[in-house]
Amino acid sequence: MSQGRQGVINYRCPNCLFRDIDFDLLYDKDLDQYYCRRCNWEGTEPEILYMIAIYKRRYKDMLKRYTVEDIIAKDE
Amino acid sequence: MDTFILNIIHRPELVPEYIDTSVQEGRTQEVSKQEVVSESINIFRLQQEIAHRNHLKTTIQMTYSSLFNDECIDLVKRHHEEFGDEIGHTFLGLNCKEFRDKFKSKELAIWLFPVDLKKAIVDDSFERFKEVFGFYPTSTGSYFMDAELIRYIKAKYPMVRAAVATCFEEGPKIFRHTNSSWYTLMDGSPWTAWIPSKQNTHAIADSEEDDIGIVALPHLSRDLLAVVDNAGDMFGTHPQNIIRGLIYEGDRLPYMYNIIDQYRVMKRYNKGYSYNLVYVGPGWMGKGGRWEANYRILKKSYEDFLAYYGRLKAENEVEDMTMTEFADWFRKNQPRSGPYCGLWKDVLWGTQNQAFWYVDSKFRVQVDLKQGGAITDLRPYASKLTRPVGAGTEANQDASYPFIIQSRYRAGAFTHYAGEGAIKSCKVRYGAEEIDLSACRTTGGYSEGKGCRILEIKPMDVEFRDLTVSLASSYTFMENSGEIIIRRKIVESTDPKAEVEIDEYLTSCWGTTEYPEDLTGSMLYVTGNDGKREELRYEYRCRDQHMDDVQCVEAVIPQVQTKISLIPAQKGCHGYFEEGYSFAPNLKIGVSHAVAMNQEFEICLKVDKA
């Protein structure tokens, strides 16, 4: 098996992200596959993007703009 | 007062730590490789240009390596003259060939050096600064500046008036987030500017004699709700934080503005004053991208970020200052010992959750409104712990100020055994039923009184099988006294004649991390109004003591030189203490009283130096 290298995009392991650990993935060019040295996750770029999309769902207001007025108007 | 102040700090870190990682992994040949240095200077130049195009002044913190780089020195001199930027100093970015040749060390954190080397590095870098610019800096900083280091700098270079002195809530959560490799273990400081105690940087000075002589700034202004249970390095006034947290889609980062605007709201809780700090190095904005974001997104995020501050400045909504200008302003306009308050509302997770923070010279207190207003973090500044850090000290890397309550690290309301972890909460009993207020979500409101700050907690409905009562609560923080007056009142009841028992309790332990520390030798006391006093030395034997008509219950934790007291305002209250055991390594003190409709129960929670 070939040496793992940093990919063109330096993805973090999505499985480790879900437990709040930043750990860079390595890329195996022979298999076109990313893998984690810490945990047992391995997968393709679409799988990484899918898991990142799920990760972001925790932020229900991620794309919502709260102005000063909006914040003051929140329940006090 | 109606003032929102901004410090923007850029540092020409010529060999950023992130790039240094690449060096170690063999992706770059050597630390001083010219292309790394050139890219770093170009990023720094771009960051400066973005600030200036938005008519914002900066503080340029000169790193050790930049003091040996002529291109960089010429650039900052020009910016100082043309834009009024302050030329300051930093202990970040020590890693470079010149430093390693001189000090024979790869250590990158000033607070972690042995004390002799700390002093030698201060002398060497300050004298080099003077040699380059012809004057000594008036501001400096690092991720953390321990009190011993600041005292030395102040004694030798008294012109220093400001320092970036800590990263707010960078502690075990961030350590874990960084694969247990980033040794910024420094929980427990104020979240906004403060004047540190001579004994401990985290603690706010309580007098002129205790004043360390600088105004301390937190590295970044962070989301005061997010940091409660998340690594703060994803939630601060730095686009990289937000990108790291994946809180964006494409090039849209509205949360970045939400944090700024929430800090503008903080004026409501601080007599018209609020503060933001932006502190960025070049490492995150390289052409190679950072985290999953490419260069275009990184660059645009910083352009958008500073453009928003620029717009606020044009509208007179923010005042940009250099670090030293701000320190001088702070000395003239803010009390030495605080207090500072923050009632932070969720602007990210889509909830109504709020966190209230209070800090003065006696303690830092975090109140979780979604847990019924339970106190979930308490740092006893009253003890002004002398806790030197760095090589050769007992604490070494652990620069946090110890807690006596920390509900996330030490369990809080929920445990896998009977009873609670560390929390200050309240139980309401009726017949055989018991409900802990930490199970009741609520929100809070803020007001001020003479010498006090008040958190009004909206009434919570407590539902028993045959009775529902609505319980209103308030916390009155008596400024710089170590006292919180806690009041509970039944404001509605399905049976106005029914009495419920209110048990104000505090479960405490001490520590800086998730792991238990030794409580052996702690003392527990219960004292009656008749003068009778029972006491117990903590030995993990699960003993307890109860007494009717108590004057107070107390716990003394000698390891953190702290005494905690619960003092009821009424007579005829029941008091108790519980020792704990090794599988439940806490101590508990409590005071209870029966109340009916429209009756109030009041206690004072007091934190003293022991």
Image: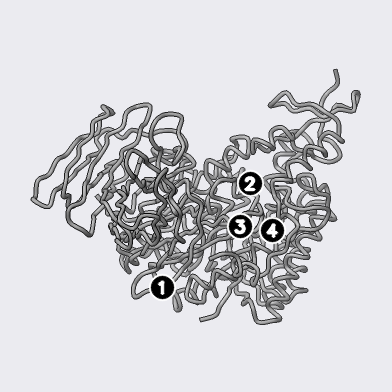
The answer to whether the residues at label 1 and label 2 have Cβ atoms under 8 Å apart is no
Element assignment for label 4:
loop
Q: Are marks 3 and 4 on the same chain?
A: yes
Q: Of residues B210 and B363, which is closer to you in this image?
A: B363
Report crowding for label 2: few under 14, some 14 to 19, many 20 or more residues within 10 A (C-alpha). Answer: many
Q: Which residue is mark 1?
A: B448
Element assignment for label 2:
loop
Q: Chain of mark 4?
A: B
Q: Amino acid at mark 2?
A: Asn
Q: Chain of mark 2?
A: B
Element assignment for label 3:
loop
Q: Are marks 4 and 2 on the same chain?
A: yes
Whether B167 is drawn above or below B131: the answer is above
Sequence-wise first label, 3 or 4: 4
Q: Amino acid at mark 1?
A: Glu
The answer to whether the residues at label 4 and label 2 have Cβ atoms under 8 Å apart is no
Q: Which residue is mark 2?
A: B95
Whether A70 is drawn above or below B223: the answer is below
Q: Of residues A36 and B341, which is closer to you in this image?
A: B341
Residue B254: x %, y % from top left: 74, 61
The CA distance from mark 1 to mark 3 is 23 Å
- Disc 4 versus disc 1: nearer the observer: 1
Q: Which residue is mark 4?
A: B12
Q: Residue furthest top?
A: A1
The CA distance from mark 4 to mark 2 is 12 Å
- Disc 3 versus disc 2: nearer the observer: 3
